[in-house]
Image (tube, helix red, strand yellow):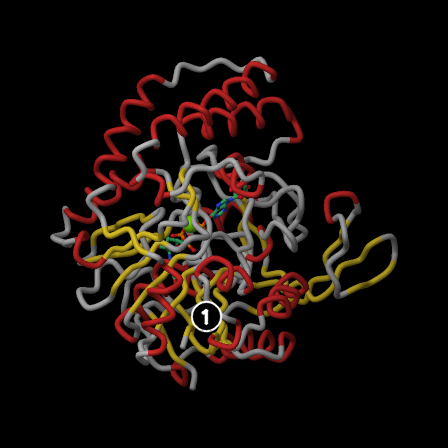
Amino acid sequence: MVDVILGLQWGDEGKGKIVDFFAPRYDIIARFQGGPNAGHTLYVNDKKVVLHQIPSGIFHDKTTNLIGNGVVLDPITFKKECESVASFGVDYKKNLLISQRAHLIIPTHRALDKASEVSKGNEKIGSTLKGIGPAYMDKTGRNGLRVGDLLDKNFTTQYIRLRLKHQKLLDGLNFHEDISDWEEEFFEALEFMRQFKIVNGEYYINNKISEGKKVLAEGAQGSMLDVDFGTFPFVTSSNTISAGVCTGLGVAPQQIRDVIGVSKAYCTRVGSGPFPTELNDPTGEELRKTGSEFGATTGRPRRCGWIDLVALKFACMINGVTKIVMTKADVLDAFEELKVCTAYNIDGESTDEIPFQMNRVNIEPQLQTFAGWKTDTTSLKNYNNLPQRMIEYVEFINKYLKVNITYISNGPGRDQLVENV
Ligand code: GDP
Ligand code: IMO
Ligand code: MG
């Protein structure tokens, strides 16, 4: 049996905290896509940790953490992350496995990411510049190197061949960067990675499922950044939706039970691209300040706006969401009034569907106003004790989406989660 936790918006919904909370209920936590572009924040003994590639179950002694084949793995970041979790006393070698089919991000992938963004000028994606796009291009272009290749005696030859290919592309883009320091670090990190259990992830996970073990698949980014269904071309390069679990881990669709979608009580986006409910005003600034909306990976300020139910409904549809976790509800505690987008006005027509090219049409969000609850909710534990106006807000969303908000997160801490059963 596999349950999934994934983001329903443009990433940073609080997936890390939620996975960490649910982890004790599962035997295996498995990342199925993305790479070091992700930044999943957890609080362990009140200390903040940001994970990029290591699954968010790593702080639980009894869970195994698998980096699935759908992930693109940067060895340098991986080594740093391992060192960071070790400082919490985690014996990562014991319960961290890597799929042999996961693709490697090599230093020239990062250079290519930069070169591509520079060449786009004002049209740039706002990539995290971690080499994600180029690494996935080498996967689908059938050139990439995989973790399993590390055990091949010809690895260095294969690496040099790929680097040469990249160098030609970089020359074509007239982009020159000295990668010698990165390369040294990269080879050190590869040595470090060779000590890990490199497994055949698909057999591993399916054997465990046959034994009755429970798997939690952890998504990175969010559904509106999905390469097929997101706001293309302002997306990431992987399938962030529930279908990505099948290809990113090698599990069949009928193994998937719950798809738990995580959404903020409002909305944020980092990087370029359309964002119909964005607030470029003091209210947007207040959301950013109250919600500490700065990127966990790049530190960039996140763009902020009201919750977008048109986009959320779309995300529920393409993922088959069975339960919703609404995070950062406490960030709205002090607001006088709140707004919710229920439809888009495009060229005088109202629609509740996502248009083909969101960035080529002028979208005016139709907003419904709610009175704020003006109550500190951060210590509340019971759904029935939540302020009535907060319950009204939640129930309006449930009704619109036809999927229930089953958990409300009211603070970054592990124990700040209110269940509505
Ligand atoms: P992820 O990428 O989806 O894991 O999310 P990030 O870690 O990038 O961003 C979420 C941020 O919100 C982190 O700083 C979390 O500590 C914080 N956070 C998560 N849930 C809550 C919540 O319910 N309330 C508040 N105030 N902060 C939260
Ligand atoms: P988590 O897992 C928010 C955004 C980037 C950029 C676009 C493409 O923490 O939710 P990429 O580096 O993939 O080429 O960037 O996607 N992006 C994210 N935004 N959260 C993330 O991950 C993101 N990963 C990528 O800002 O707009
Ligand atoms: Mg994040």
Q: In the displayed image of the protein, which residue is found farthest to the right? A: 348
Q: In the displayed image of the protein, which residue is found farthest to the left? A: 89
The x, y position of residue 300, in whole percent, is 45, 37
The x, y position of residue 396, in whole percent, is 60, 77
Q: Which residue is at a point 31% across and 48% down the rendered structure image?
A: 50
Determine whether, in the image, residue 202 is placed left or right of residue 395. left
Question: Circle 1 is placed at which residue position?
Answer: 325
The x, y position of residue 59, in whole percent, is 22, 59
Q: Amino acid at mark 1?
A: Val
Determine whether, in the image, residue 366 is placed left or right of residue 212. right
**Mark 1 crowd level (few <14, some 14–19, many ≥20, 10 Å Cα):** many
341 to 121, vertically: above or below: below
Q: Which residue is at a point 33% across and 60% down the rendered structure image?
A: 412
Q: Nearer the viewer, residue 169 or 116?
A: 169
363 to 4, vertically: above or below: above
Q: Which residue is at a point 52% across and 42% down the rendered structure image?
A: 139
Q: Nearer the viewer, residue 138 or 257?
A: 138
308 to 142, vertically: above or below: below
The residue at label 1 has a CB less than 8 Å from ligand 1: no
The x, y position of residue 88, in whole percent, is 15, 51
Determine whether, in the image, residue 186 is placed left or right of residue 284. left
Q: Secondary structure at mark 1?
A: strand
Instruction: Tell me the quarter of the image containing the N terminus.
Output: bottom left
Instruction: Tell me the quarter of the image containing the C terminus.
Output: bottom left
Residue 272 in which image quadrant: top right
Q: Nearer the viewer, residue 396 or 249?
A: 249
260 to 298, vertically: above or below: below
